[in-house]
Amino acid sequence: MDKLVIEGGKPLSGTIVIQGAKNAALPILAASLLADGTTTIDHVPDLLDIDVMLNILRELGCRAEHSGGTVVLDTETAHTSHVPESLMRQMRSSIFLMGPLLARFGETQVYQPGGCAIGERKIDLHLEGLKALGAEIEELGNRIICRADKLRGADIHLTFPSVGATENIMMAAALAEGRTTITNAAREPEIQDLQRFLNAMGAKIMGAGTDTITIDGVQSLTPCRYKVIPDRIVAGTIMVAAAATRGHVTLQNTQPAHLSSLIHVLRRAGVQIVVDGDIIKVGSATRPKAVERIVTSPYPAFPTDLQSQVMVLLTLADGVSVLKETIFEGRLKHVDELSRMGADIRVDMNAAFIRGVPRLYGATVEATDLRAGAALVIAGLAAQGKTVVEQIHHIDRGYEKIETMLSRLGARISRYSPVPNN
Ligand code: UD1
């Protein structure tokens, strides 16, 4: 397994261009199945999760090429709607394929994507949404068989604004007969991006970004060319890394509005932030201030995907901060690893009480999930001495060559791959 070795204590400095958003690209790739022919998607990051999605699409019979940030996907040759269990298990987001496959083939067979390191991650809202559109769903152990001769528009109220369920329903409803209304829909920017993409293919969808989305089904969609939005979580990770190392970094190709809750928190911590169009400048020369209370919640509130990274900054703050995780029950696993680096954190239920320390110290730590891994990298950059981050395949799921990106900002970070035995 690869690992990252970081010599900490050097402030980040320089300019970086932010990659395309993984969480926007994944549903957009799945949604491409709704149109027959060749769709071109630009600004698709080169990541493990994207590779898994493209491999699934190839397994379904599509032709897919990914080079220079562009995916060219020909769906005309898609011939099956059955996703193999082995691929399904590699990535939870494969569940996004249910909606488009059902709409295209009238049936699909997928498998439970299973739990994961950050929590149980149920799919009941996805299944209820598809049922409301007229699908019959049979669950045989891990296997889920879904059939619908015809999908019909429906009023669907989500009991929780699930990002994935909102996207799955939007994709299936795009080709359903009549109008679908989703209430208590998730409002994340990636949902707005999916709406723009589907509408570029000829769908009639309104309201993404609000809690009510209306989809007027159309008979067919046509392939198009589309550019994915910038990754707000990668941008946020770099912003926190700049602040934690007391550096100065300019981020290009961002959408600052997507980061307003993080910008607010960082400003409360005393970090200097200047926003100018799609550029964000982050600077910090002094010890951060504690932030009394941060609670993760659905967008536009503070994102769970930045909780672990911000926790690292707060471990170095002057005073006690409280960070409460409300989205995923298992998302405080990085606390143990940060404690090994000298952080002073007490966890009570889903809240972390963080007493800032003057410095962290390098240690060998293990990435337990994608964002926790990114947090440990930030901790390593800010710490005194050498940090080794293991299990970095988690990080490769969401950050395009993280060591290259950070080296460009002056970090002393290298990847080590095991030497094969023969
Ligand atoms: C997406 C993001 C992920 C982010 C999360 C929350 C992608 C590829 N991933 O994940 O990075 O952390 O949003 O912002 O976009 N839930 C149910 N039943 C369901 C679906 C979800 O109970 O059918 C629960 C989950 O267990 C979880 C919460 O709802 O506690 C949020 O999940 P959801 O918004 O669906 O997240 P994802 O779409 O999986």
Image (spheres, grey):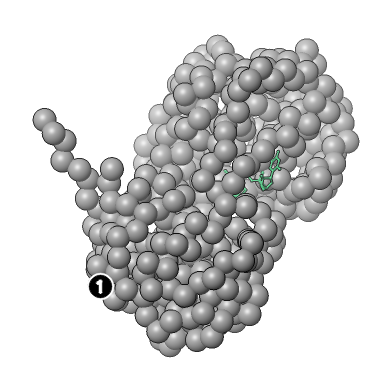
Within 10 Å of disc 1 (Cα), the crowding (few <14, some 14-19, many 20+) is some
**Relative to the observer, which residue lies in front, 268 or 114?**
114
Left or right, 267 with reference to 133: left
| In the rendered image, the vertical position of residue 279 relative to residue 157, given as above or below | below
- Viewer-side residue, 368 vs 209: 368
Residue at 65% from the left image edge and 75% from the top image edge: 293
Q: Is residue 222 above or below residue 119?
A: above
Q: Seen in the image, is 13 located left or right of residue 139?
A: left
Does the Cβ of the disc 1 residue fall within 8 Å of ligand 1?
Answer: no
Image quarter where the C terminus lies is: top left
Q: Position of residue 57 (x, y in %)?
A: 50, 24
Secondary structure, mark 1, is: loop
Q: Quadrant of residue 243?
A: bottom left
Residue drawn 25% across the image and 67% down it? 386
Q: Nearer the viewer, residue 255 or 6?
A: 6
Give ligand 1's quarter of the image: top right
Residue that appears at 20% across and 43% down:
418
The residue drawn where x is 43% and y is 73% is 343
Residue type pointed to by label 1: Gly
The image position of residue 383, as x and y in percent, is 33, 73
Which residue ends up furthest to the left in the rendered image? 422
- Look at the image and tell me in which quarter the N terminus lies: top left
* Image quarter of residue 9: bottom left
Q: Is residue 292 above or below residue 370?
A: below
Residue 250 falls left or right of residue 298: left
Instruction: Answer whether residue 218 is visible to the viewer in this image.
Output: no
Which residue is tagged 1? 385
How many numbered tags mark residues here? 1
